[in-house]
Amino acid sequence: MTDNRSEDDAPKAAPTNRGQGPSVPPVPPPPPPVLPRRMPADTPRPTHPAQHVAPEPEAAAGRQVAPPEPETPRYEPRVSAPGEDLPGAPPPHRESPDRDVPESATLAGHASDAAHPRHVTADSVGSRPESAAPSASAETTATATATAAAAAAVTEAAPGTGSGTAPGPGTGDGADAPTSEGGSPLAPTDGAGASGASGHVATATTGPRPAPLEEWLRQQVAEARWSQPHDVLGPHPVDGGTSVRVVRHLASAVRIVRPDGDDIELTHEGDGLWAGATTDTLGRYRVEADYDFDESTDSDDATWTTDDAYRFAPTIGELDLFLFGEGRDEQLWNHLGAHVMTVDGVEGVSFTVWAPRATAVRVIGDFEGWEGRTTAMRRLTDLGVWELFWPGAMVGQRYKFQILTDAGWVERADPFARRAEVPPLTASVVTESDYTWSEGDAQWMEHRAKTTTHDRPMSVYEVHLGSWRPGLSYREAADQLIGHVQYLGFTHVEFLPLAEHPFGGSWGYQVTGYYAPTARFGSPDDLRYLIDRLHSAGIGVIMDWVPGHFPKDEWALGKFDGHALFEHPDPRRGEQLDWGTYVFDFGQPQVRNFLVANALYWFEEFHIDGLRVDAVASMLYLDYSRTEWLPNVHGGRENLEAISFLQETNATAYKRYPGIVMIAEESTSWPGVTQPTSAGGLGFGQKWNMGWMHDSLQYIEREPLYRSYHHDEITFSFVYAFSEQFTLPISHDEVVHGKGSLYGKMPGDEWQKRANVRAYLAFMWAHPGKQLLFMGQEFAQPSEWSEARGLDWWLLDDPGHRGVQDLVASLNRVYRETPALWTHDATADGFEWIEGGDAPHSTLGFLRKDGDDRLAVFVNFSGVPVERRFGLPAAGAWHEVLNTDAAEYGGSGVGNLGVVTAEDTPWAGRPASAHLVVPPLGAVWLKLAR
């Protein structure tokens, strides 16, 4: 994809010395010092003239200056130059909302705490998946930083001493701070609320000292606006020892405390940065900070002891970064997002996010008071992955990312969050699963891997969990839903999208948290419990998945880092105007990886058995519902990138999880939807038969008197029934928005409406293909569905509506017991016409067969009984295994007394025949006795 940024958006490199010899441009004067926020009003400002006066040009010769930026990759953040203020300002301080969340473990208390490093033992070091980076100690961190520092260090002769200074920060981004005549870095004159000292200036020492910082860099680091905070903060090797620098705004004193008791008092450099050094390596340590918020009393004095987040090596491995860059990390959710882990014996959470065009990124949350100035993340690669391990953060705490864009700071939820707040709240939540799957689930998964949906019965009950029975949690729904589905005999439950979504009226189809089950009904482990219970009861689980588009909520995926990132940058491809949503950039490797891994995530982490992919047609066609569109490279309207994405998703899912099913909601005649990708198909396992749904509903809505004139509407689907692996859907889309329920579509009085529903369902279950029925239609609910209220369960007290439910249970029972109905769904050898052209009587008959297993189906869509001779393939007793007009289903009892005897009398090309009664608005299934 080409870079669409304007010249103004291009990354700007910091000024650099490109001259040869001693003549170099002077360092631009630093801006006035920025005091830490919330400093007491009476705090004296630094007064040393060297902090306000730019150095003379001759004094600046040979000085360290900000380095040039590297070659600009596809994505590159805008980095400020010395003296340049980045656009925007941090959001105002937001106090942590008063909610029942765990208190941060980072506020560990005074040195007397058991958590103090002097009391710490050698904990076992946790790790991420095998490909992640190993845990690192402070020594290894310092060693890694020393390599970068040696390559970028610029030395100078300090005035008056002739001795060299310590190297700058690891990448060379820092520069020397103004120095006194003695050559040591200048510390600001300290006042109340700063260092607690009497205002002296540090003097030169013979021991190691921290590398000095230019004031512009110090301010960037103090405000968490620097892309490489680990190069400035934390431990770093210097001549003669190790330096350490931390950010502690408003502290009156800061020290490094170590298990051996050899503490290091730090000096306030200004803007909340504190620094010090030691002649040896630091090893494991913690940071202790004193706070005196009111000098007139000691009652609010506090000492906080915390681990230093900037002493740890990256928690994501180079291989993981490489695979993500290539778009081939099939377990991406294990590497990006928030993950609880133990590093160097310290428990905390690793936060990782992809924001390639961000200038700076901070993670904010319950663990740090939602302030952000001490939680700057580091940019790891040109790919734009940012990372920070925060010691003490824990499961249950909320968080967000603050991203510095060209327009200022913005807050975003974590795209890889595996849990979120209950809408309308929008923060992400740290979570880890401790769920143990049952033996019943294990047996289900083992059996699933040995079969496919093509060679087993599959009838699906579609459920919107929030309105099936309102108020139920995932766990509470388990017992009630399982009992209902078992009675009806469905093999699978299909849930409307359960990924997090802010607007309930979208039914889940406008997703903001692709990796987070919606918190409306409980925790992720609660959803695991529901699926586990369904599997143990012998019921499969399918979930709707929405990879085609996503909403424009400003806190979610849209313009994530200030630019089009997950969406295509050109609105002619990047927006779906009908739905007011963005369209994913399927050609971007990292976006494809985000989506492919998301599909695998639901199979891996939640053991689901299938995904129904929503709105596939909108993905396949570049001109779908658009008046302005861009053709593909060949000039056509096919979205080649989306096609490739769907093929990759399906092939990968079937490779990793045998026995699952990928289902396409594809409303056009796109060829090869269920053909394997090796044959050029899209690779789906099933496709919704939208043509059958449209034609059959159009037919059944007509008055019986006029159906004979439109007989082709009910028979046309048999022409193409074997071109794909089809599912016949009566879904949520057909019973909402003024379309009426299935019962509501039928003509006639109440009895006729229910009779029409029974006949139609019998026709549907006998038609080649799998079946899907939306909740409420199984008992012929008259009102159309609304997500705002539950189903009309009270209707089951009416014998007529209960009869329809009993019919559905019988349909599923006979269906599962009759291989002829499901073994040859996609091949013509499993179907044979008996009577397809009896338009005057609105009657049709056909055979479903599997070897010697044969089922004769007769359906009468007219309002009068049909009583005549029909041809059959063999003489003998044919049992009436189902009659929709039976009294037990609320019918009138017209039928054949349970059995039909076929004679050796040829009829209509058949070797045998029988006199048969097909009830009005009814269907009869006959099975040859063996």
Image (tube, rainbow, N blue to C red):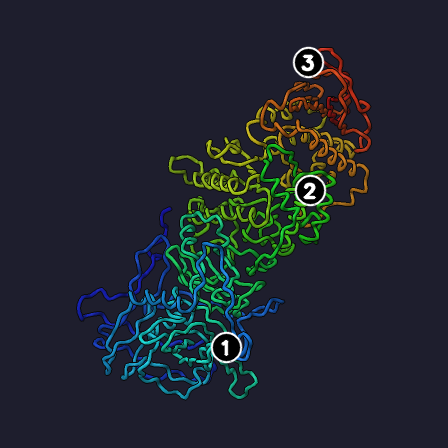
Q: Is residue 577 above or below residue 189?
A: above
**Dot 1 or dot 3, earlier in sequence:** 1
Q: Nearer the viewer, residue 830 or 705?
A: 830
Specify whether 503 is left or right of 19.
right
Residue that appears at 42% across and 85% down: 191
**Dot 2 or dot 3, earlier in sequence:** 2
Residue on which the image places disc 3: 910
Specify the quadrant of the image occupied by residue 142: bottom left
Residue 757 in view of the camera = no
Residue that appears at 66% across and 26% down: 820
Q: Is residue 92 above or below residue 746?
A: below
Q: Is residue 588 above or below residue 904?
A: below
Q: Nearer the viewer, residue 782 or 634?
A: 634
Q: CA distance from mark 2 to mark 3?
A: 41 Å
Residue flagged by tag 3: what amino acid is it?
Arg
Q: Nearer the viewer, mark 2 or mark 3?
A: 3
Question: Percent x, y for residue 256?
Answer: 44, 77
Q: Is residue 121 above or below residue 361?
A: below
Specify whether 312 is left or right of 910.
left
Question: Percent x, y for residue 358?
Answer: 41, 59
Residue on which the image places disc 2: 775
- Element at label 3: loop
Q: Nearer the viewer, mark 1 or mark 2?
A: 1
- Element at label 1: helix
Q: Nearer the viewer, mark 1 or mark 3?
A: 1
Residue on which the image places disc 1: 118
Specify whether 864 is left or right of 600.
right
